[in-house]
Structure formats: C-alpha cells, structure tokens
Image (tube, rainbow, N blue to C red):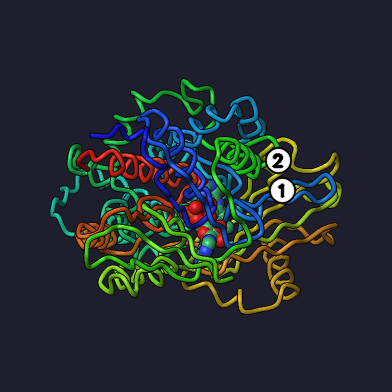
Amino acid sequence: MTDVSEQAPKRVVIVGGGIAGLAAAFSLQEKAAEAGVPVACTVIEAGAEWGGKIATHRVGEFLIEAGPDSFLSQKPWALELCAKLGLSNQVVNTNELGQKASVYSRGRLRELPEGLVAVVPTKLGPFLRSGLVSWPGIVRMGMDLVLPGRFNAADESLASFFRRRLGREAFERVVEPLMAGIYAGDAEQMSLRATFPQFIEIERRHGSLIRGLLAGRKTAGASKGLSGRTPFVTLKDGMGELVRALVARVRGAGATLLSGRRVSALRAPSIRSKVWTYDVVLEDGAVLTADVVVLATPAYVAAEFLRPISLTVSKLLDGIPYTSTATVALAYGSNDLGPLVRGFGFIVPRVERRDLLAATWSSLKWPHRAPPAHMLARCYIGGVGREDILRADDATIVRRVRDDLRHIAGIAAEPVHVEVNRWERGMPQYVLGHRNRLDQIQAAMSGFQGLYFTGAAYRGVGVPDCIRDGNEAADLVVKYLTGRRI
Ligand SMILES: Cc1cc2nc3c(=O)[nH]c(=O)nc-3n(C[C@H](O)[C@H](O)[C@H](O)COP(=O)(O)OP(=O)(O)OC[C@H]3O[C@@H](n4cnc5c(N)ncnc54)[C@H](O)[C@@H]3O)c2cc1C
C-alpha cells in the first residue's frame, strides 16, 4: 500500500470565502499536514473581498462594521483561531464604563436588568426596578419555579417555550428582542432545538429555567470569566482583521485563493461509476476538477449546485429560509447628543412596532471606533416580518432610522456620516424542524463521497459557530482522505 504522503496532492475546492470557508481552509491545511496528507486547496469567492458577512470599513477615523461587530467569548472557537493567528493581543473587551444596554419599552428606554443569563432573567431585584415587566408579569415569571416541565421530543418554537415558562410579557419585552438581535427572526417560527438547545436540557434537569440558570451561575462565576474576557469581544482594528490574518495564513501555507470568481455549477461527471471527482464550473467558463468539494456558501446557493446531483438534497437545502437585514452606521458629534445616549445601546421589542431592531453605541461599547468628540451608532433593521423597510432607497431608510433615534434616544442632530449596508437574504432562519432537516440532508448525502457543507445555514449563525463548523468540515475532509471511518 502506498503511503498517502507519496501520492499526488488531493485537490480540495472550497466554494465561499466567508468565515466558515476560510476557517475550513485554515483547519484543513493544519490537519492535513498533521495527518501527512498532501492537499492542494483552492478557495473560490464570488465577491471582490474576502470574509463574506464580515466587512470592516474605515472612513476617516471611524471604524464601521457592516456585518458582525463582535463575537461571543464563551464560545471558544473564534478566540482559539485568533490565538493561532497571533491575534490574541488584538482582542478587545467591551469598554468598562456604562456597561448596560437598554430596552425601549412603553415609551422610554429602560436599562436591561443585571442577572440576565443568555436571554433569561435570574435576579429578581434588578428586574423589579427596571420596570420592564409589570407586577403581574413578574409573578407569572416566578411561576417558572413551580410549573411542571414538558419533556417530549417534538420541536417547539422559541415563543411557545418562553411564553410557557416565563409568561407572555417577559417573553415579549425581554426574551424576544434579545433573540431578534441575534437571529433577526420570528420567535413564533424559530426552533428551540436548533437555537437554544441548552434550555431544553435545563428544563429537563431542573424542571425550571430560573432554577437551572441560577445553578449554572454558581459554577460559572462573574461576567468576566476566567479568561478575563467580557461576554462579547472584538478586534482592535475590527472584525476584518480576522479575515485579513486568515487569508494571509491560508495563502502563505500554499492555498490558491481566487476572489471575484463566481462558481456557477457543480458537476459530478462519473457519479454513476462511483468515481468521486467533481467539476467546479466558474462563471467565466473555467473548470476545476476536485477530489473534495466543501460548499461554504449560503444554503440557497448550495441548493442550486446540488440540483443536478441530488434533487432531494437540493430541495432540503432550499427549504432553509433566509431573511434580509441592513446595518445603518450614523456618526455624530458628541456635543450633539443628549443624556439618553449612554451605555451600550438598546433593543426594541417587536410589539413596539418600530423600524429599529436594535442600536449599538459602537464607540461607547468598543475602544477605537470613532475619533475624539464623536459617537458612532450602528443600527440594525429588517428581519422576518420587518423587511418592508429594505424596499426603500438608502435616503428613506436613513430618514426612518433617524426618526426612530429621535423618538427613542432623543437624537435630533444631523449625522456627520451615514452608511447603509444591506444584507439581502443574509441571515438563515432555524425554523421548526431545522435539526430534522439537517439529519435528512446527512442521510441523503450518505450515498455521496467527498462533498461537504459548512456555514451559518446549519449549526449556528454566530462567528464562533461558523468557525467551529468550518473546523468540523475540515475534520471530515481529512478523515475521508485518509480513509478513516466517519
Ligand atoms: C448584519 C449582520 C450582523 C451580524 N452580527 C453578528 C455579530 O455581531 N456576531 C456574530 O457572531 N455573528 C453576527 N452575524 C452572523 C455572522 O456574521 C454570519 O453568520 C457569518 O459571518 C456567516 O459566515 P459564512 O461563512 O457562513 O457565510 P458568508 O459570510 O455569507 O460567506 C459565504 C460566502 O460565499 C460566497 N458565495 C456565495 N455564492 C458564491 C458562488 N456562487 N461562488 C463563489 N462564492 C460564493 C459569498 O460571496 C460569501 O462571501 C451577523 C450577520 C449579519 C448579516
């Protein structure tokens, strides 16, 4: 038997140069080298820039994040990647001052009470003082401690679960806006199993969400964990720094990186004879033959590629819905702002029926985001059931966002800079049955070899989850290439 390292390099093509595709490429190079498998890795990205949703813009001294502006430090995969890329000293915590975010509720901003664990309140005192939920609402929340748990295997929507445990008011005023800030989704349709599976386990083990989270807090410690990191962290020069470092490292390790090249089709020419090679067809007519293909595109793009190969998988992928969002950056002179602009920003419950989902005071939350005497705000709009505003032109969007900022945070001043960044079909939705759908995709793919999917569409939308998913795709590729059982 020939040693794998003596064989011609295996051709691996990764389609999509967002964080999942780049993390997959990086991890593949690392793991293939460890396993002694020579690989020739090519990453193909349709856009002119690498990074997909991660896009940092510098405008003068303003640092604007068009997409994600931070990541969760409790999920270790992004921090681990930063460490491998030599970026640990660039990771920055949220500013120490004014650590609170607010909720716009019943006509004014109210500070989010301390003691929120994930999206669930666990401290009574601060919650009572916040005025976010009425007395009857608080009593209803407390019933979580005595209501019996429900333990069936069926998927449940986020709305149904949190209404059942904490009551309608706490759900509408606290849980829903926090959750919408992450998924831009409709809680009535979103799957608990696919988004917050830990709560199913908490209910099963403790019979109560509040009791379970309190028990967890005792072991977890204070808000800055042992790592010294705040719950959300970013990079000093923006999230784009992660992409730049990844691209440099992946290229330096010998991968071919093609940007501004769109893949138009995938063919499996010898599939009937079970010869597993794939032709990756580019829009400009070029064809790359690959032993392994990793599709790190949105699911609806992967669905198109799969159509001639497996209609079943194509349809399953196409069934993952997406919603569109936009971020609107507005920069102001600090002297133009009133007393309501403090803390980290605010979220807006759907029941308030405003255009804004959330606003972050970026330069108050993070260091190095705006020049002295200026404040940079990042507003989030769109999402399921709130996409209408995205049909308007940029000027109208800015006017409507400014109306909300005036109404909610008293900002009447002219911004010194505005920027609208649209993300059409930018956010996958893990709706009821999402996990089943993934199982079905996996089952249908078992007849194929050398073809993998990664990215935000599947097992987590946040940057750390996408990195973990890219790493896992690389694991599968190396196992496949070394002939190990998966
Ligand atoms: C506005 C916004 C704010 C967010 N904020 C946060 C946040 O603060 N923190 C956080 O953790 N997460 C956040 N997220 C989520 C997170 O940013 C994304 O889920 C993640 O970056 C997606 O990475 P990905 O690699 O899966 O997909 P993408 O970044 O979408 O990458 C897929 C790539 O495939 C390319 N592609 C598509 N079709 C083709 C083709 N035919 N040929 C070649 N290439 C193709 C695309 O151009 C794209 O670059 C946010 C998302 C959005 C939209």
CB under 8 Å between discs 2 and 1: yes
| Residue depicted at x 40% and y 33% | 31
**Nearer-N-terminus badge (2/1):** 1
- Residue labelled with disc 2: 364
Closer-to-camera residue (413/143): 413
Closer-to-camera residue (314/135): 314
Q: CA distance from mark 2 to mark 1?
A: 9 Å
Image quadrant containing the N terminus: top left
Q: Is residue 79 left or right of residue 338?
A: left
Residue 422: percent from left, percent from top: 63, 66
Closer-to-camera residue (352/261): 261
Residue 247: percent from left, percent from top: 60, 42
Q: Residues within 10 Å of mark 1 (few under 14, many from 20)?
A: many
Q: Residues within 10 Å of mark 2 (few under 14, many from 20)?
A: many
Which numbered circle lies on residue 407? none
Outermost residue on the top side: it is 226
| Residue depicted at x 61% and y 29% | 87
Residue 417: percent from left, percent from top: 82, 58
Residue 396 picture quarter: bottom right
Which numbered circle lies on residue 341? 1
| Residue depicted at x 55% and y 71% | 285
Query: Can I make out residue 181 in this image?
Result: no
Residue 260 picture quarter: bottom right
In the structure shown, which secondary structural element does the residue marked by tag 1 occupy?
loop
